[in-house]
Amino acid sequence: MSGAQLYDTIGATYTVTRRTEPRIAARIWAALGDARTVLNVGAGTGSYEPSGRHVLAVEPSALMRSQRPPGAAPCLVGSAESLPFDDLSFDAAMAVSSVHHWRDPVAGLREMRRVARRVVVFTHDTDDAAWLHRFWLTRDYLPEVADLVAGRPSMTELAGAIGARTEPVPVPWDCADGFFEAHWRRPESYLDENVRRGVSVWARVGPDAERRAVRGLRDDLASGRWAERNRDLAGLGAAELGLRLLIA
């Protein structure tokens, strides 16, 4: 199932839990530099689109496009691998948490590089498998995530395709954007159906794995086992869980 098809199926409540996290947005917008024209690829509902710049969005999912708020940037139907623009049409192209849904991530990044002078991508480092062990959700409840990550191009391949450098992006403990790793210090959030429906990982691992993980987490929260296993997280303000900016 393509990313567009997946979110046309699960994305009806996406805006309930997925929104711009200001601290991550600040990193993305700083990386855009002085770009005045920005293409947002795999734009979803419009989170992280910078104000004060001329933004054009591209999004393949009809359901996601329908949830863009009034006043959001104009949005075209399209995919990263085939952008309908001339070379260097934009000062910058950005993509936020969408590369893993693309049919061909390397081709999509090269297309972004073709149409823009600068490329900024917020994504996940698949070279760093250690985060699977650092993150209690994948380590103790949802090991199937390792299989999802294994099939993706490496961060080295992605960066090499467009001559990008990488920067780590720690996840703040009170992250406003409810992506998969966001609730690392708020485990009860993963018991919320809306939180899970806003993250494609849960759909991709399947209902049996999801039910098992939720049941195990609920039991461990009730018994105090989760708190005992993860007592070292209590004082942390941010966690390094493999999220990266690619900047070219």
Image: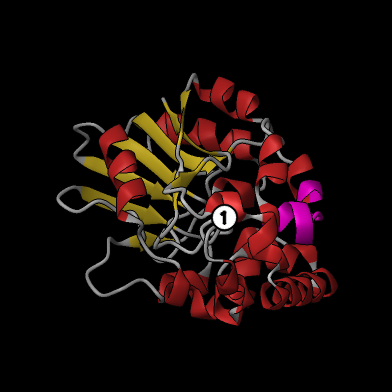
Image label count: 1
Are there few (<14), some (14-19), or many (20+) residues within 10 Å of tag 1?
many
- Rendered location of residue 230, percent (x, y): 64, 55
- Rendered location of residue 10, percent (x, y): 62, 75
Pick the quarter of the image with the N terminus. bottom right
The amino acid on which the numbered mark 1 sits, given as a three-letter code, is Glu
Q: Which residues are magenta?
A: 137-147
Residue drawn at 22 percent across, 35 percent down:
35
Q: Which residue is mark 1?
A: 181
Residue drawn at 14 percent across, 50 percent down:
52
Q: Is residue 194 magenta?
A: no
Q: Quadrant of residue 115?
A: top left
Overall secondary structure of the magenta section: helix
Left or right: residue 8 compared with residue 164? right
Residue drawn at 78 percent across, 63 percent down:
205
- Rendered location of residue 82, percent (x, y): 53, 44
Q: Is residue 146 magenta?
A: yes
Would residue 142 be seen by someone viewing this image from the given angle? no
